[in-house]
Image: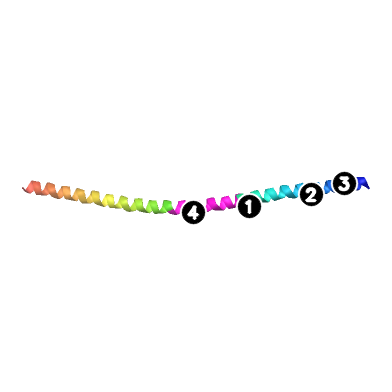
Amino acid sequence: YNEAVKANEGKKDCSRQCKAVMRKIADQVRAEAEQWSQMQEMLCQVRKEMEELQSCRDFWQNRALDSDSQIQNLHSSVEGWRRKA
């Protein structure tokens, strides 16, 4: 009888330990899933900001190219006036 009681208590201890380990694992998985979700949100935000920056860069690059073209046209006009003068 004593052996049966000890064996049963041993099983209960093992079961408790197993449940505790499983709980720890589940908590860790939940925490990592939450971190992953936050990382995905941050990545999405960074992507949006990168797209906005690229759009701004393209806008200012086009403005700079237009300004260069206008400056070249003005230089050509000035040269033409100098030749006529």
Q: Single out the mark in the foreground, 4 or 2.
A: 2
For the residues marked 4 and 2, what is the alpha-carbon distance in whole angstroms? 43 Å
Identify residue type, mark 4. Cys
Label 2 belongs to which residue?
Answer: 15
Total numbered labels placed on residues in the image: 4
Residue 23: horizontal and vertical position, in percent?
70, 50
For the residues marked 3 and 2, what is the alpha-carbon distance in whole angstroms? 12 Å
Q: Single out the mark in the foreground, 3 or 4.
A: 3
Label 3 belongs to which residue?
Answer: 7
Label 4 belongs to which residue?
Answer: 44
Query: Disc 1, disc 2: CB below 8 Å?
Result: no
Residue 36 is covered by the magenta coloring: yes
Q: Residue at x 80, y 47 (%)?
A: 13
Circle 3 — which element?
A: helix
Q: Residue at x 58, y 52 (%)?
A: 34
- Horizontally, residue 7 falls left or right of residue 48, namely right
Circle 4 — which element?
A: helix
Q: Earlier in the sequence, mark 1 or mark 2?
A: 2
For the residues marked 3 and 4, what is the alpha-carbon distance in whole angstroms? 55 Å
Q: How many other residues sit within 10 Å of disc 1, few (<14), some (14-19) or many (≥20)?
A: few
Identify residue type, mark 2. Ser
Q: How many other residues sit within 10 Å of disc 2, few (<14), some (14-19) or many (≥20)?
A: few
Identify residue type, mark 3. Ala
Label 1 belongs to which residue?
Answer: 30
Q: Earlier in the sequence, mark 1 or mark 3?
A: 3
Q: Single out the mark in the foreground, 4 or 1.
A: 1
Q: Earlier in the sequence, mark 3 or mark 2?
A: 3
Q: How many other residues sit within 10 Å of disc 4, few (<14), some (14-19) or many (≥20)?
A: few
Q: Which segment did they paint magenta?
A: 32-48
- Horizontally, residue 31 falls left or right of residue 1, namely left
